[in-house]
Image (tube, rainbow, N blue to C red):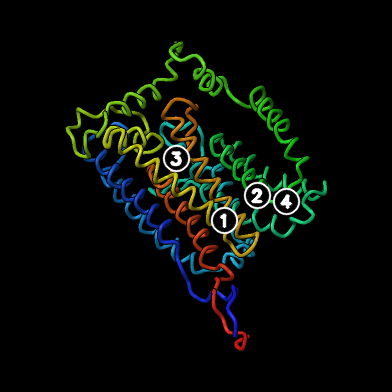
Amino acid sequence: MRSAFKKIPNTKHSIDMGLLFAVTICAVISTLLIYSIVRSGISEIEGVGSSYWKTQLISMSLGIIAAVVISFMDYRRLAKLWFIFVPVALGLVALTFTSLGYQRSGADDQAWIRIGSFTLQPSEVLKLAFILSFSYHLSRDEEDMNKPVHMLLLLIHGAIPIGIVAMQGDYGTAIVFAALFGFIMVSSKISWKYLAAAPVVIAGVVAVMWFFFLSEFHKKRILILFHPGSDPENIEYQQDLGLAALRSGGVFGKGLFADSNEYIYVPELHNDFIFAYAGQVFGFVGSLGLIIVLSYICLKVFADSRITRDRLGRFICMGAFGLFFTHCVMNIGMVLKVLPVIGVPLPFLSGGGTAMVSMYAVIGLVLSTYSHRAVTYNVFYDDDED
């Protein structure tokens, strides 16, 4: 009999409760903020119904259920079903180019489908499908990925969702897909030669987008960041209002249910500019607290990527990390006026049922990789048991 470190099968199902609790805290705060917006009457300016907060609450509940259910599923088996969920996700996105396509008020892209009173943003479903399918593709092809033909196939896989959502006019989501592709690729065995060439390729893509695809309005949204206050067309008014709203909360905020006249209205306050409203309600301290919780979520997902049982699990977690990190940076940067208005929601905080449920589903994938770790470690074991 002797003592030593030994790997033993991990037969228990364990959920990363810290991660699930953190995202649910954000979702609860989101519901409270939207309820406050509705109660204050600000929502009437945007045409948000009085039951909108209930939709957010239901979406949060469905999301928690989805995350827990997915955590019990083996992510390896889910990834092998790519031939089912990828066509479904692409088919839903394709519907946005038909008569079912819907351009939400205040948006400049047709990225929703509407059936009766029900609306759905298919690109949110596509994000989930892409993380799973691309992670599976790369895990199967990683040893040969640096060969030109294999790299070309990976690039095509990444370019498909980017191109489709760009055709919708949803450039913010296109950037998110590009970030997903980049974060997953960087975590693989990609050759340094490709990494060295990446900045040149990115610069070329940006130049092509600037000269051939972006409208003058989109260009002005970007250029105004370098020349604030020189805006004869008032393009920056939304961000100016967002900054004013954020500052108006002071150190500790005005509270959830202050007099409606005390709140500053910002277009898309319940959605893309929810962080500006959080600043009014919770002040600097509360806003900083939200950033800390969101940072914890991102770092926890990244940490979970380091303890997965295989490369597929790592790629899935890195895709999830890229998704949450990119959304947080782009949304908060937009509110702080250091990035252009580009229509990317703040994870688990912005209003939107599709985004809430899909984000929870991505968390479910991370929980699945966490709960299906192959081994745990036992310090003492008996040789006679081997």
- Residue drawn at x 19%, y 39% is 257
Q: Which residue is mark 3?
A: 345
Question: Circle 4: is it few (<14), some (14-19), or many (20+) Cα within 10 Å?
Answer: few
Secondary structure type for disc 4: loop
Is disc 1 in contact with disc 2, using a CB cutoff of under 8 Å? yes
Is disc 3 in contact with disc 2, using a CB cutoff of under 8 Å? no
Question: Circle 3: is it few (<14), some (14-19), or many (20+) Cα within 10 Å?
Answer: many
Name the spot of residue 266 as percent of width and height, x first. 33, 28
Q: Amino acid at mark 1?
A: Ser
Q: Which residue is mark 2?
A: 187
Distance between the Cα atoms at labels 3 and 2?
25 Å
Q: Amino acid at mark 4?
A: Lys
Is disc 2 in contact with disc 4, using a CB cutoff of under 8 Å? no
Residue extending furthest toward the right = 148
Left or right: where 1 falls relative to 105:
right
- Residue drawn at x 58%, y 37% is 175
- Between label 1 and label 3, give the one nearer the viewer: 1
Q: Is residue 7 above or below residue 169?
A: below
Q: Amino acid at mark 3?
A: Pro
- Residue drawn at x 72%, y 44% is 155
Q: Which residue is mark 1?
A: 305
